[in-house]
Image (cartoon, rainbow, N blue to C red):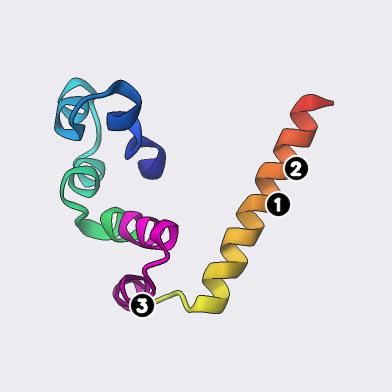
């Protein structure tokens, strides 16, 4: 959910701080969105690094998370895509 929230500034055309101020969010989510801090912030930085193809940053963030390796990260991404595809197919049936 934090990942989706990180796009609200673009969607609404306003600074993320303004979005956060208008919505009631847990402090952990606010820290992630504003400062990329905490466990959620770390995960958000990993997603952003993957989107940019920043291999160095990916390695740093994965070391911070201490539970993922490249193989598990790719497997998790593929599992997520497969799940989204199944959901999409179910919705259109």
Q: Which residue is mark 1?
A: 82
Label 3 SS: helix
Label 2 SS: helix
Q: Which residue is mark 2?
A: 86
Residue 61 covered by magenta stretch: yes
Residue at the farthest right position: 93
First to last magenta residue range: 44-65
Q: Whole-percent x and y of residue 92?
A: 79, 26
Q: Is residue 13 left or right of residue 89?
A: left
Rounded to the nearest whole Å, what is the CA distance between mark 3 and mark 1? 25 Å
In percent of the image, x 50 and y 77: which residue is there? 70
> Looking at this view, is 16 or 68 the one in front?
16
In percent of the image, x 39 and y 59: which residue is there? 52
In percent of the image, x 68 and y 48: which residue is there? 83
Q: Whole-percent x and y of residue 65?
A: 34, 71
Q: Whole-percent x and y of residue 50?
A: 43, 62
CB contact under 8 Å: marks 1 and 2: yes
């Amino acid at each position: 959910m934090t990942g989706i929230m990180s796009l609200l500034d673009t969607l609404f055309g306003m600074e993320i701080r303004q979005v956060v101020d208008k919505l009631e969010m847990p402090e952990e989510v606010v820290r992630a969105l504003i400062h990329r801090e905490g466990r959620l912030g770390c995960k958000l930085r990993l997603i952003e690094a993957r989107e940019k193809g920043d291999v160095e940053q990916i390695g740093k963030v994965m070391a911070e998370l201490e539970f993922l390796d490249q193989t598990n990260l790719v497997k998790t991404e593929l599992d997520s895509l497969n799940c989204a595809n199944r959901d999409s197919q179910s919705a259109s049936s």
